[in-house]
Amino acid sequence: MQLSHDSKLKDVVLNHPATAVVLEKAGLDYCCGGKQTLGEACMQAGMPPEELLARLQEAAGADSPEKQNWAAAPLGALASYIVEKHHGYVREALPRITAHLEKVAEKHGERHPELFKIRQDFDLVSREMTQHMQKEEMILFPFIQQMSDAVESGAGLYAPFFGSVQQPVAMMMQEHDTAGGLVNEMNSLSGGYVAPADGCTTYELVYRELAEFDHDLRTHVHLENNILFPRAVELEQKLTYR
Ligand SMILES: [Fe+2]
Ligand SMILES: [Fe+2]
């Protein structure tokens, strides 16, 4: 969707969930006042539309998938890409989705009790992923970079405290299964993230956000399980630890 002065606030958020935060920060109501266009809302709020449009485009652009062949790229570059693109997205999305789920569960939970379970699952996945990404960023990914540097320079490498890279890799893959299981459950509880006819814009928004989160997690896990991790295990075979 192309963003312009004539875009309705509601459509902006529904097509590009990452823009919700920008509108919230600007104090523009995309929920009950969502039928307003960007131009109208800016005029009312007394802010220049160009500036807001630029910020919205930046946020919307961040969720368009980048195509790159990672099977041959340097491993350090792939790890950095995952951290910047996927860990960055997860960190940005967790508080945003949590707040929206809270609001929707409170307002519609009585009529749609599955919202309480979805909120609980999301809370779990949120805690799991926060710790999981920290482990990757502090232990596994820096070690992959070290292996990569050692192979390139021909210099030796001290054996890591975890023995072999296969250890943290197996652990991370197990954690991916846990997070994936929770996401699958949210997916089926929400009937594939389809909001009911009696839901408000935030209800529909949070389901789109969850669908986006679901999609991002699958891409993220695919890059790690199917490309980064097997290549790291293969790279280790070329090394002799000191
Ligand atoms: Fe990750
Ligand atoms: Fe991971």
Image (cartoon, rainbow, N blue to C red):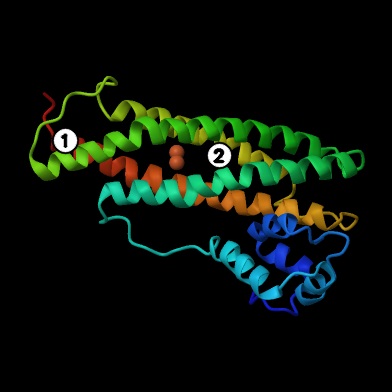
User: Mark number for residue 180?
Assistant: 2
Residue 242's place in the image compared with 172, above or below, is above
Quadrant placement of the C terminus: top left
Q: Residue at x 54, y 34 (%)?
A: 130
Q: Position of residue 38 (x, y in %)?
A: 76, 73
Q: Position of residue 181 (x, y in %)?
A: 58, 36
Residue 51's place in the image compared with 195, above or below, is below
Q: Position of residue 177 (x, y in %)?
A: 51, 35
Q: Is residue 146 left or right of residue 194?
A: left
Whichever of labels 1 and 2 marks the residue nearer the N terminus, that label is: 2
Kindly state the secondary structure of the residue where label 1 is placed. helix
Instruction: Give the residue type that dot 2 points to.
Output: Gly
Q: Is residue 3 left or right of residue 171?
A: right
Kindly state the secondary structure of the residue where label 2 is placed. helix
Q: Residue at x 15, y 38 (%)?
A: 150
Quadrant placement of the N terminus: bottom right
Could you classify mark 1 by the number of other residues whose Cα lies within 10 Å: few (under 14), some (14-19), or many (20 or more)? Answer: few
Cα distance, mark 1 to mark 2? 29 Å
Viewer-side residue, 22 vs 235: 22
**Count of marks placed on residues:** 2
Q: Residue at x 15, y 30 (%)?
A: 157
Q: Residue at x 8, y 36 (%)?
A: 155
Q: Position of residue 93 (x, y in %)?
A: 62, 47
State the residue position of label 1: 237
